[in-house]
Amino acid sequence: MSYILKRFLRLGIVFLTIGGLFFSQKNNTPPPVREEPATKRQETSDKKKETRIYYSVVRVIDGDTIVIEMNGAYAKTEAKVRLIGLDTPETVDPRKPVQCFGIQASDKAKSILAGQKVKIETDPTQGARDKYGRLLAYVFLPDGALFNKMMIEEGYGHEYTYRLPYRYQKEFKAAEVRARELKKGLWADGICD
């Protein structure tokens, strides 16, 4: 083959490759957004070094539902998180009146979580999201405390199992028994008469 013919073939291949890339990108939808953490912080344990991902709490909806901020591939996104194993009295459900001790539970959650960075842990036994599209998770505070369990222990909510047992179910049930015995929060005498 002549030198000129080889050169035309190479240029043709280059143009076809570039054109193919251009048209495939133009006609396809963008790749799905990969959610990444808002903040990373290193924690050291005696056995090994591990990375834990912390998310900023944007707002507290009520005692058992929060909104966190995540960084996506294209923009920051917010995700509603429904806390596994915890049910607090309703304050924002338009179908129900505000329930006894609901405002106190919401206020407690706000006082602990507002502006906080938390670790989110999912549970494969519960699925990724509920029927309303909320992420199902446990929420850990920076000191390692499990917020879901803390709310039950202090009497701001009760243990809640939706269909299947979950990872911390025994602990949460025991926490509710202790709160009832000690008459904490919504279990106190005369609170919800």
Image (spheres, rainbow, N blue to C red):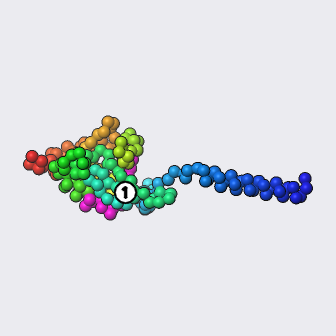
- The answer to whether residue 99 is seen in the rendering is yes
* Mark 1 neighbour class, 10 Å CA radius: few under 14, some 14 to 19, many 20 or more: many
Residue 97 is situated, as x and y percent measured from the top left of the image, at 18, 48
- Choose top left, top right, bottom left or bottom right for residue 172: top left
Give me the residue at 22% from left, 58% from top. Answer: 107
Q: Residue at x 39, y 56 (%)?
A: 78
The extreme right residue here reads 2
Task: State left or right for residue 152 relative to residue 59.
Answer: left
Left of 30 or right of it: where is 67?
left
Q: Nearer the viewer, residue 94 or 53?
A: 94
Q: For residue 25: magenta?
A: no
Residue at screen point 29% across, 44% down = 85
Looking at the rendered structure, the secondary structure element under dot 1 is: strand
Q: Which region of the structure is painted magenta? A: 110-123
Query: Which residue is at the far bottom?
Result: 115
Residue name at image x 24 percent, y 51 percent: 92
Nearest the viewer among 120 and 12 is 12
Residue 168: where, in percent of width, then height?
32, 44
For disc 1, the marked residue is 68
Number of labels in the image equals 1
Considering only vertical position in the picture, is 159 above or below 50? above
Residue 182 image offset from top left, x and y in percent: 15, 48
The amino acid beneath tag 1 is Ile
**Residue 63 placement (x, y as % from top left):** 26, 52
157 vs 183, left or right, is: right
Q: Is residue 170 left or right of residue 75?
A: left
Residue nearest the observer in this picture, 155 or 31:
31
Res. 142 in view: no
Task: Farthest residue to the top: give it.
Answer: 163
